[in-house]
């Protein structure tokens, strides 16, 4: 699709900030059923490319080609599944080369996600990210007008869900509680008028109201099509069968099996049957302040105590907060070098 610079400038960029196992894939699928909303897959390119390209307003064909190569090299997720072919992306950027700046090339990059979706009416891009919770200062510089949807799930149920999928490096409940707290405590850096909290539990129990609230926050009219999720993900994967390895598609169907099921509240409150009282006490000590801030009950107000809690919450900080803080300032060239070496070793 060909865009004028005015059309690109009119497209807003906002964010969904979330945590693993909070219903974010389902939420993104619902957003993408709205003709005016595009919710791309998680790629933090806009953050990583900003220092290099933020002041660039003149783009040669070589510059554009280099940008495309770098984007595909640094990508973290499944571009074969969620992004246009490399040659299609390059051709599009070259067509728009005469009026590219950083804001416009970022928007054009976003608009090449989900190539099965029509983009002719897109007015809002909603980038779903986990890592961006820890880069809010940079986000405000890059996207000063952005608003933030906070997608959250009760940490106690979140722990059970993560343990079942063996997500993250460690599945100890106090480690996972520490990750949850470190993530959502960053909410304090977002002005109240710039954020909208969507609870997983409310999204499941009253999907329509949650989506109406979301659309109002984004400045678009709610569309009933957003509720019609049955068969959408399966249909998307079928359209991608020629582009993606069959074994990978099989694993993806298994991992995202919930997207093919009817929306159910059966996993709400599951922690009550699994977590011991002593563990619940420590989890509430770790997360209580932010549970209450996000609208969840927490009966313990004491700060975390005990060597085990201190140990696991310290590990959680090292695993995500400090690791992300250390990775971000690494020069883009070094990031690309490491990624290319890693990608080449996989292909051998």
Image (spheres, rainbow, N blue to C red):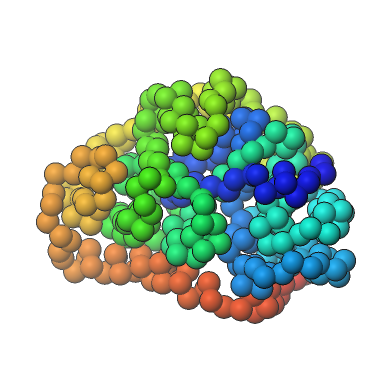
Q: Residue at x 63, y 25 (%)?
A: 231
Q: Quarter of the image holding residue 315?
A: bottom left
Q: Is residue 336 visible?
A: yes
Q: Residue at x 23, y 68 (%)?
A: 310
Where's residue 192, x and y in %? 34, 47
Q: Residue at x 52, y 35 (%)?
A: 219
Q: Is residue 160 visible?
A: no
Quadrant where the N terminus sits is: top right
Q: Residue at x 45, y 64 (%)?
A: 137
As displayed, is residue 222 above or below residue 164? above
Q: Nearer the viewer, residue 131 or 63?
A: 63
> Is 48 positioned to the left or the right of 171 in the image?
right
> Is 258 positioned to the left or the right of 302 in the image?
right
Q: How many marks?
A: 0
Where's residue 311, x and y in %? 26, 69
Where's residue 291, x and y in %? 26, 46
> Is 298 positioned to the left or the right of 16 in the image?
left
As displayed, is residue 32 above or below residue 282? above
As displayed, is residue 153 above or below residue 323? above
> Is 21 positioned to the left or the right of 45 in the image?
left
Q: Nearer the viewer, residue 193 or 338?
A: 193
Q: Nearer the viewer, residue 157 or 107?
A: 107
Where's residue 96, x and y in %? 82, 54
As displayed, is residue 195 above or below residue 139? above
């Amino acid at each position: 699709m060909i865009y004028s610079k005015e059309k690109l400038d009119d497209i807003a960029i906002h964010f969904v900030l979330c945590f693993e196992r909070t219903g974010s894939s389902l939420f993104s699928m619902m957003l993408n059923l709205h003709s005016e909303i595009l919710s791309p897959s998680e790629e933090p390119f806009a953050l990583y490319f900003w220092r290099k390209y933020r002041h660039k307003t003149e783009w040669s064909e070589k510059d554009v080609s280099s940008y495309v190569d770098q984007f595909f090299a640094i990508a973290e997720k499944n571009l074969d599944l969620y992004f246009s072919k490399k040659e299609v992306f390059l051709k599009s950027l070259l067509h728009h080369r005469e009026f590219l700046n950083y804001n416009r090339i970022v928007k054009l990059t976003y608009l090449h996600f989900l190539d099965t979706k029509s983009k002719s009416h897109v007015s809002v891009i909603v980038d779903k990210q986990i890592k961006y919770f820890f880069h809010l200062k940079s986000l405000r510089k890059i996207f000063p007008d952005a608003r933030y949807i906070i997608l959250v799930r009760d940490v106690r149920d979140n722990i059970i869900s993560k343990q079942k999928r063996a997500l993250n490096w460690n599945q100890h409940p106090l480690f996972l509680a520490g990750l949850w707290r470190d993530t959502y405590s960053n909410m304090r850096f977002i002005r109240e008028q710039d954020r909208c909290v969507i609870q997983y539990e409310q999204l499941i129990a009253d999907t329509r109201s949650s989506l109406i609230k979301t659309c109002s926050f984004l400045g678009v009219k709610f569309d009933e099509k957003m509720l019609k999720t049955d068969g959408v993900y399966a249909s998307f994967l079928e359209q991608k069968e020629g582009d993606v390895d069959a074994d990978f598609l099989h694993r993806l169907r298994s991992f995202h099996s919930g997207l093919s099921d009817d929306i159910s509240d059966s996993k709400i409150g599951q922690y009550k049957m699994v977590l011991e009282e002593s563990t619940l006490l420590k989890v509430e000590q770790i997360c209580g302040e932010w549970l209450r801030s996000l609208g969840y009950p927490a009966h313990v107000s004491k700060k975390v105590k005990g060597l085990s809690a201190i140990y696991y919450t310290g590990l959680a900080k090292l695993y995500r907060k400090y690791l992300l803080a250390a990775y971000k300032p690494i020069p883009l060239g070094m990031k690309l070098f490491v990624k290319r070496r890693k990608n080449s070793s996989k292909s051998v």
